[in-house]
Image: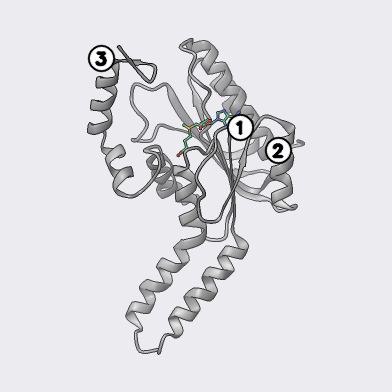
Amino acid sequence: MFISGRSLSSSKIWITRQMRDKYKKKAVAHNYRSRSVYKLIELDQKYKLLNPGNVVIDCGAAPGGWSQYISQKVFLDITKEEKNSSTIADDNDGDDNLIVADRKEEQEQKGLVIAIDLLSILPIHGVNFIQGDFTHASIQKKLQDLLKGRKADIVVSDMAPNFSGQHLADHVKSMDLCEAALSLSDQILKSEGSFLCKFLMGGTEEEFKKRLQERFKQVRYEKPDASRPKSTEGYYMCLGYKNNIEP
Ligand SMILES: C[S@@+](CC[C@H](N)C(=O)[O-])C[C@H]1O[C@@H](n2cnc3c(N)ncnc32)[C@H](O)[C@@H]1O
């Protein structure tokens, strides 16, 4: 018997795994749309990637877990910080709340988050969503239009191809998505900007890493705790874009 393309026994295994998965439980408890948000959170905590007022591009965003977290960091951190300090100074007749509102408005004006995916997503506060194939010139043109000449602080890509079951073919498609994300970064990243991309291992990732090293001061391989050990996925975390690369 099949349920949504899975046999009954593999569906049972999938459901049991989901129920046991600590990141899945955390994502539900914190209203995140994906467990994979914890991969980004781990890397953000380690490298301090995302800050209020940043310009961020999220490639392969559906269902939206990463974009939710990015939006919180780009638009709302300032509110938390200011609220904490206003708890200490509580004798100012609400002046702190005005400061919070002003600073928040300032960040909302400065910050820009653009998310792209083949699939649609439900709206997320502050996130400009483009539906379409990231590798198509028309989609990248829409992205450039939204940027209005501004440069990005960080480009993240959690894009993954539909798994065909043929490991080598999936690896090649995954590296093509990485190449597309890097090529966009060459056009829009600020000097000293960051780039994070997921890939499926399979042999050519070392070649790709060399090209990253030409462009960034630091390139590290990462396998966040939330990335399932059995999965062949890994991430390249790149810091300090050198900005002297011809696109
Ligand atoms: C692992 S999911 C991303 C999960 C996301 N980071 C989150 O936290 O919700 C990978 C996504 O990449 C998208 N994707 C794959 N190829 C793409 C392409 N060529 N253009 C845009 N999105 C693509 C898929 O549609 C899929 O939604």
- The residue pinned by badge 1 equals 212
Q: In terms of secondary structure, where does tag 3 sit?
A: helix
Reply above or below: 145 against 175: below
The span from disc 1 to disc 2 (Cα, nearest Å) is 21 Å
Q: In terms of secondary structure, where does tag 1 sit?
A: helix
Q: Is residue 206 visible?
A: no
Q: Amino acid at mark 3?
A: Ser
Q: Position of residue 58 (x, y in %)?
A: 56, 42
Q: Residues within 10 Å of mark 1 (few under 14, many from 20)?
A: many
Which numbered disc flags the more N-terminal residue, 2 or 3? 3
Q: Amino acid at mark 1?
A: Leu
Label 2 beta carbon less than 8 Å to ligand 1: no
Reply above or below: 188 against 162: below
The span from disc 1 to disc 3 (Cα, nearest Å) is 42 Å
Quadrant of the frame with the C terminus: top right
Q: Residues within 10 Å of mark 3 (few under 14, many from 20)?
A: few
